[in-house]
Image (cartoon, grey):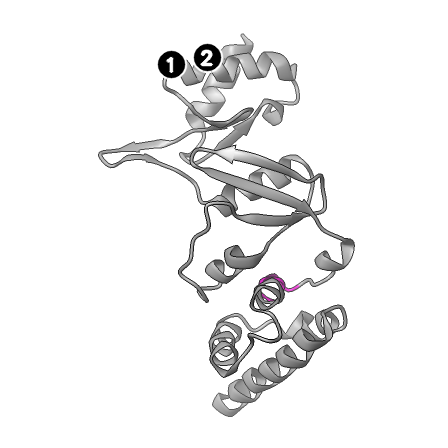
Amino acid sequence: MVIDDIRNNIEAAPYGTLLFNSSYPEYDEEYVGKVLSDLVRQGVLCRLSRGIYLKAKHTKFGLVYPTTEEIARAIAERDNAEILPTGSTALNMLGLSDQVTMTPVFLTSGSARKISCGNKVISFKHGVPRNFAVKGKMTRLLVQAMKAIGESGFNTDWQNAIKKVACRYPEFDTIQQDLKVMPAWIRRELSKIFKYVQNEQLAEA
């Protein structure tokens, strides 16, 4: 039976797995939604938001939830879209800020939307293709973080903090191409930072 196939698949899946009505394309989405809702009532899954389900691990401290980024990336994968954390979300992911926003914002190549997940609202804003032209994973985050800081707020403290991040995640293979598609002031600052990191690594070699 279809319900048995879906239940067996979910039971074999690791904790933290996110599921959608479209997770089983071989079956009708509406029917899959009903099956997943039944599994919520049975305690097998929990509902994060409309049409978004989680196989959560139960501990003595409560349910273990995935991170906001993991939820956002699962939604993006479902929608076949690219996403980029912005603002305080990007700063936090890089370890440049301890601030955790209750409304994380991601740029998306897909449709703009807001999705409520528990006590958080994840906002997806449509981004122009230029935002996704930067290929380095960490460099992408750095660009968004620096946009949040702003040129007028970028000082020596920020420069030193970003140097530390760049030392941990040097992306020399993509940086020259990535620099070409950045805003001018960010290109200028990151050029100096990556040159510093490269010289430091050459000195250690």
- Residue beneath label 2, please? 38
Element under label 1? loop
Residue 86 coordinates in the image, percent (x, y): 58, 56
Q: Nearer the viewer, residue 160 or 167?
A: 160
Q: Is residue 139 magenta?
A: yes
Relative horizontal placement of residue 59, taking residue 149 as reference (left or right) = left
Tell me the kind of residue under disc 2. Answer: Asp
**Which numbered dot is residue 42?**
1
Residue 168 coordinates in the image, percent (x, y): 48, 72
Q: Few, some or many C-alpha atoms within 10 Å of disc 1 (few <14, some 14-19, many ≥20)?
A: few
Q: Is residue 35 above or below residue 199?
A: above
Tell me the kind of residue under disc 1. Answer: Gln
Q: Is residue 200 magenta?
A: no
Snapshot quadrant of residue 182: bottom right
Q: Is residue 22 above or below residue 201?
A: above
- The residue furthest left is 60
Snapshot quadrant of residue 60: top left
Residue 45 coordinates in the image, percent (x, y): 42, 23
- The residue furthest top is 1
